[in-house]
Amino acid sequence: MDDQADVVVIGSGPAGWAVADHCARNALDTILVAPAPTRAWTPTYGLWTGQVRPLPPGAAFIRATRLLAADRTLDRGYAVLDNEAVMAAYTATAVRTVADAVVGIEQGRPPGVALRSGRRLRCRLILDASGQPGRLGKGPRGVRVEQTAYGMVFPEASAAALAVPGEAVFMRWDRAGTEWPTFLYAVPLPGGRTLLEETSLARRPGLALPELKRRLMRRLEKAGIDPGDRIGTEQVRFAMDAPPAPVRDSVVPFGVAGGMMHAATGFSVGEALTAAPLLAAAIAQSLPRGPDAVRRAARAQLWPASARTVHRLRTWGQRTLLRLPPALVPEFFDAFFAIPEDFQDAFLCGRDDPRGTWTAMAAVFGAASTRVRAAMVSASLTPAAARALERGAGE
Ligand SMILES: Cc1cc2nc3c(=O)[nH]c(=O)nc-3n(C[C@H](O)[C@H](O)[C@H](O)COP(=O)(O)OP(=O)(O)OC[C@H]3O[C@@H](n4cnc5c(N)ncnc54)[C@H](O)[C@@H]3O)c2cc1C
């Protein structure tokens, strides 16, 4: 195979394939390199139905017949990717794949990547979609803020006591007082299956998987579901605190590698899908004008000032979650799902909409009970300011 291309994409996760596909659709010669570039993903990927449009023709997903969140039915559509069908659709595109690992990035004219096999790929631009920072030696240090979950997959009839077949349950809290709060996440999967997953949204460090499994078993037992009926399991652990990664030289970080994860929800797949066509078009238009123009276009597309502000607001939301007293977390989400759905939408999906994000956060504050409001204020302060406030209140 020719080792020259316009664009080399590192990584075959949702972000890598999405941006590679759209680069190819913009007539850019595109190579995607990853250890197993055409292997179907194993995690269960959920996203809002408004975000599936950029998938390639033939890609399939399951659309939940109803979405329940904190005991409310939401109008917003929720989808789960059919990973086998999505990968089959991606591999039918014009993207060329190389099964190898990148061991070094070479800044030169032209730039390129060095592969474990000793091979080199030359290109005009590198898109780094290699996932969690740290894999290529980057990333924040110290104890990370993590989302963790433990799930079991059942034939849909066996799981019906907790999730009606076809329906998605976004957040059903285990309101067990002072325990770190976890909730049930349940979604329909292809092939008449249901995933039941006990989830800890954000914690530093993530709640341990054996504890999540114990709580899931407790939930199954209460609902009369036999864990012996399970046909699969899923374990989730990922960091949620990566900052936006800068575009440098000939490398554009994208997806989780670029810090494009919602700091308060841990979602990134929908945002990668929706950002990919815009980024690919900006790259195709600016490439003929040289590397400086590409860098400017990529920065403007991925991290305009508005997106950086939204990232800060979402991180503030994450900090609030980490500091809320455990017993108040479910109540906090009751308030979130009580605000108008277009506000919820702005908070969940508006990655460059600071006004919408802020309006939603203010609306949650307005909808919350007095004790949740007080906790939100104190959680928003620096630890020193919160201690001073508590001392003041005690005098
Ligand atoms: C079990 C699980 C479930 C999740 N569920 C959801 C969900 O429902 N919705 C959601 O929005 N988010 C979810 N997330 C969070 C997040 O969106 C995912 O981690 C998602 O996979 C990130 O996509 P990505 O393409 O950016 O990175 P990844 O999917 O991590 O892909 C990285 C790719 O880079 C490759 N790679 C790494 N290093 C190299 C190298 N040196 N050379 C070449 N290739 C390399 C890897 O092999 C991989 O193909 C989930 C995470 C997990 C772990």
Image (cartoon, rainbow, N blue to C red):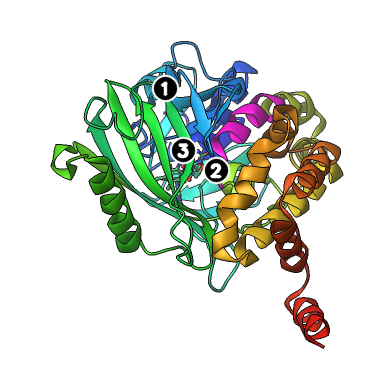
* Residue at numbered disc 2: 129
The range drawn in magenta is 266-279
Please name the residue shown 37% across and 19% down the image: 85
Please name the residue shown 77% across and 50% down the image: 365
The answer to whether the beta carbon of the residue marked 2 is less than 8 Å from any atom of ligand 1 is yes
Tag 3–tag 2 contact (CB < 8 Å): yes
* Residue at numbered disc 1: 86
Q: Which of 53 and 48 is in front in this view?
A: 48
What is the crowding at mark 2: few (fewer than 14 residues within 10 Å), some, or many (at least 20)?
A: many
Q: Could you tell me which secondary element the residue under label 3 belongs to?
A: loop
Answer with left or right where residue 195 lies relative to residue 174.
left
Residue 272 appears in which quarter of the rendering? Answer: top right
- Rounded to the nearest angstrom, the CA distance separating label 2 from label 1 is 18 Å
Mark 2: amino acid: Ala
Nearer the observer, disc 2 or disc 1?
1
- Rounded to the nearest angstrom, the CA distance separating label 1 from label 3 is 11 Å
Q: Is residue 387 above or below residue 300?
A: below
Magenta span has 337? Answer: no
Instruction: Give whichever of discs 1 and 3 has the lower sequence position.
Output: 3
Q: Which of 116 and 370 is in front in this view?
A: 370
Please name the residue shown 53% across and 67% down the image: 204
Residue 13: mark in rendering = 3
Quadrant (top left, top right, bottom left, bottom right) of the N terminus: top left
Residue 275 appears in which quarter of the rendering? Answer: top right
Report the label total.
3
Q: Could you tell me which secondary element the residue under label 1 belongs to?
A: helix
